[in-house]
Image: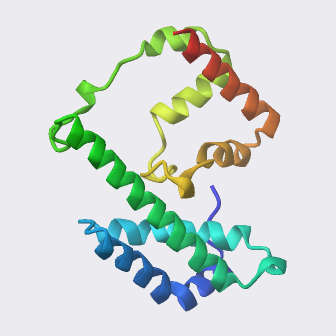
Amino acid sequence: MTRTSAAEAAIYEDLEDRVTRIARGIASQAKYRDGEELVSHARLIFLEAVRSHDPARGTLERRVVFLVRNRLKDRMRDAQRRSAILAQADVDPDTVTCEDAPRFDRDGLMSRLGPDGRAVVDLVLSCPAGLAAVDNGPASRGWLRRYLGDLGWAADRAAAAFAEVRSALSRG
């Protein structure tokens, strides 16, 4: 897994107040209960912005502000949509549990997969602590591919494993 470099830490120190203000402001506007969760998510977005920054397309500060603001607003809109759907379904989100979710036959799925497909499913179902972001939003997308790349998997090997899992899941 990639660690934060000293240069990234220094850049974050310069922009930390701005990133934090943006996250808390969006939390306040959306009347979101856990503003610190948004601040943490904003930090993940910050790292992504630093790592994907292209100086030819503008300043780093502009990229950070753009990504943090837009991705957090998207996250809040998604949360509001989910809340609206739950309200229409007359479901109390505080009482919905994993037992209410559809189940799948893990052993049956694993028996239909090769070693790479099983490795991917195991990583998803038994994710090492701290590997994936809590949220499946834009900042956390691709964590599994990056992790597999860090383990030395070629992109085509990872793509083939994902395709195998997708196919096995669609067959039921």
In the figure, residue 121 lies in which quadrant?
A: top right
> x%, y% of residue 16?
49, 85
> x%, y% of residue 9?
59, 81
Q: Residue at x 24, y 26 (%)?
A: 100
Above/below status of 47 relative to 55: above
Q: Report whether 148 appears left or right of 33.
A: right
Above/below status of 18 relative to 153: below
For the N terminus, which image quadrant?
bottom right
Q: Which of 160 and 69 is in front in this view?
A: 69
Q: Report whether 160 appears left or right of 135.
A: right
Above/below status of 162 relative to 85: above
Q: Which colour scheme is used?
A: rainbow
Q: Report whether 166 appears left or right of 94.
A: right
Q: Nearer the viewer, residue 104 or 118?
A: 104
Q: Nearer the viewer, residue 6 or 22?
A: 22
Residue sitting farthest toward the right: 56
Q: Which residue is drawn at 49% across and 8% down?
A: 108
Above/below status of 92 relative to 17: above
> x%, y% of residue 147?
64, 46
Count of all numbered marks drawn on residues in the image: 0
Residue sitting farthest toward the bottom: 14
In the figure, residue 92 lies in which quadrant?
A: top left
Q: Which residue is drawn at 18% across and 36% down?
A: 91
> x%, y% of residue 55?
80, 80
Q: Which residue is drawn at 67% across and 49% down?
A: 146
Q: Nearer the viewer, residue 22 or 113?
A: 22
